[in-house]
Amino acid sequence: MTARDAATALAATTTSDWVGAGIAIASALLVAVVLDRIFAWRGREIAKAVAGGHDVTPAIATRLRFARRLLYAVIVLLGIAIALSNFDGVNQVARSLLASGAIAAAILGFAARQTLANFVAGVMLAVTQPLRVGDWVYVEDQYGVVDDIRLTYTYLHTLGSQTVVIPNEKLASGILRNDTLGATTVGLEVSVWLAPEADAGRAVRALQEETGLEVTVAEIHQEGVRLAVSGERCPPPERSAHEAALRLRCLERLRADGLLPDAE
């Protein structure tokens, strides 16, 4: 059958076909919404009962949220497939495409590669749990709390009240720092650079006296010496403010001791 014949058959659909398709899609949406509400209402209670009455952990909460989204998407896709099956023209087009299955599969796979990659990465994130809803994470140059992990994208809320949308494939294949995984507080670490001719030993002693924290010579470069000040711990949301205050204390002490040049 040619494409023209398939188009003609599709145009010849009756009103009952359209009504049946509409009912199928509406029914699928209704079932998906009802099950999603039930899942949201009872899922946490069931998980808590399975956990022996303990509170639901962030890992379980993330998996429950992902399962809800996956169930919703599957039901809607099934409804669309049932709706399309009401049209003879669609069936004929499908048979025509199956006749050249290799080409159709290659075209479809290429067109949907990014979406499928993000979906598979989302499944992997839900199973392996390198990050969970509520975790404070650092992804490339973005730092914030995980608001939501969806089927294809993850939403990050930064300290500047911005929402960053990250493809799941980038999270699954890249490097991220999770400040919440395994601990409720994170350690601080700030870097202070000295001029090459500055007395690094004296600077280390001055900062240890000023902060009471561990100070080390972290890096030596032809353009200067980097000191690392670390040791204090705080909740992840407060990390940025504490590091800024600690950095300022270090700079003021070094400048007061003549170890940093005065601003002109």
Image (spheres, rainbow, N blue to C red):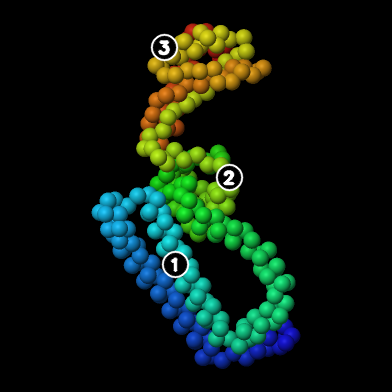
Name which residue lies at 42% across and 41% down. 181
- Dot 3: what SS? helix
3 or 2: tag closer to the N-terminus: 2
Q: Position of residue 175 (x, y in %)?
A: 56, 42
- What residue would you read off at disc 3? 209
> Cβ–Cβ below 8 Å for labels 1 and 3?
no
What is the crowding at mark 3: few (fewer than 14 residues within 10 Å), some, or many (at least 20)?
few
* The one of 142 and 123 positioned closer to us in this rendering: 123
* Label 3 – label 2 distance at C-alpha: 39 Å
- What residue would you read off at disc 1? 71
1 or 2: tag closer to the N-terminus: 1
User: Label 2 amino acid?
Assistant: Gly
> Cβ–Cβ below 8 Å for labels 3 and 2?
no
**Residue 140: numbered disc:** none
Question: Where 260 falls versus 176 (above or below)?
Answer: above
- The quarter of the image holding the N terminus is bottom right
Q: Quadrant of residue 29?
A: bottom left
User: Label 3 amino acid?
Assistant: Glu
- Dot 2: what SS? loop
Q: Position of residue 95 (x, y in %)?
A: 66, 83
- Dot 1: what SS? helix
What is the count of numbered marks?
A: 3
Name which residue lies at 43% across and 79% down. 27
Left or right: 199, with 158 as reference point? right
Name which residue lies at 59% across and 17% down. 225
- The quarter of the image holding the C terminus is top right
**Residue 174: numbered disc:** 2
User: Label 1 amino acid?
Assistant: Leu
Q: Quadrant of residue 51?
A: bottom left
